[in-house]
Amino acid sequence: MTRTRRRRLLLVGMLMVGLGAAATLGLSAFRQNLLYFHQPSQIVAGQVPVNTRFRIGGLVKYGSVQRHGRSLQVRFAVADCQAAVPVVFKGTLPDLFREGQGVIAYGTLDKQGVFEADQVLAKHDASYMSSDVAKALKNGRKTSCMPARIQASR
C-alpha cells in the first residue's frame, strides 16, 4: 500500500469515527428530551418510572380542587376511566381550568404517587379528550366509562 493510499484510508477512518460519535451524541440528546404521555391508570398500575419527566392527561376530578390560602399552590386529581392521580401545581392555572375539564400536565411523579406538575394546560376543545371518552361519545352514548362524579357535561 502506498503512502497516499494509507493517508486516505486513515482520513476516511477518522471521518467515520467522528461521524459515529456525532450521531451517538445527537441521538442521546434527543432521547433525553423525549416527553412521554401517560394516563392515570398507567401511573396507578406502576407502569411509569418515578422521578422521570412526562405528561399526564385526563379530566380534573370533581371535588378534588384544593387551593391553599393565598399561595399559588393547588392540589387536584386527574382521572381517566379506571383511576385518579393526585397532582400538585404551584403557579397560575389557565383560565379554562375547572373540575370536569380535560387537562394535560407536565412534571414528575414522586415516590408517594403524587404528580408534581410544573405546567398545566387546559382543554379548549375535544382534541384533549381521552380515547375512551371519545369512543363512548362517538357510539351515541351521552355518558362514558368515567365515574359519574368526574364526567364532563357536554
Image: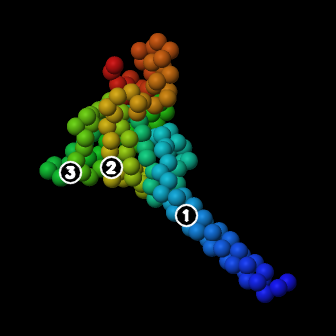
In this rendering, the label closer to the viewer, 3 or 2: 2
Name the N-terminal-most of marks 3 and 2. 3
Of the numbered discs in the image, which one, if any, rests on residue 72?
3
Q: Assess whether mark 2 and mark 3 are in contact (beta carbons under 8 angstroms).
A: no
Name the quadrant containing residue 143. Answer: top left
The residue shown at (72%, 76%) is 13
Question: Seen from this angle, which residue lies furthest left?
Answer: 70
Q: What residue type is labelled 3?
A: Leu
Task: For residue 14, say whether it is visible.
Answer: yes
Q: What residue type is labelled 1?
A: Gly
Residue pointed to by mark 2: 119
Q: How crowded is mark 2: few (under 14 residues within 10 Å), some or many (20 or more)?
A: some
Quadrant the C terminus occupies: top left
The residue shown at (48%, 40%) is 39
Residue 142, image x and y in percent?
41, 15
* Rendered view: 112 above or below 44: below
Name the N-terminal-most of marks 2 and 1. 1
Real-space Cα separation, disc 3 to disc 1, in angstroms: 38 Å
Q: What residue type is labelled 2?
A: Gln
Residue 132, image x and y in percent?
50, 27
Q: How crowded is mark 3: few (under 14 residues within 10 Å), some or many (20 or more)?
A: few
Residue pointed to by mark 1: 26
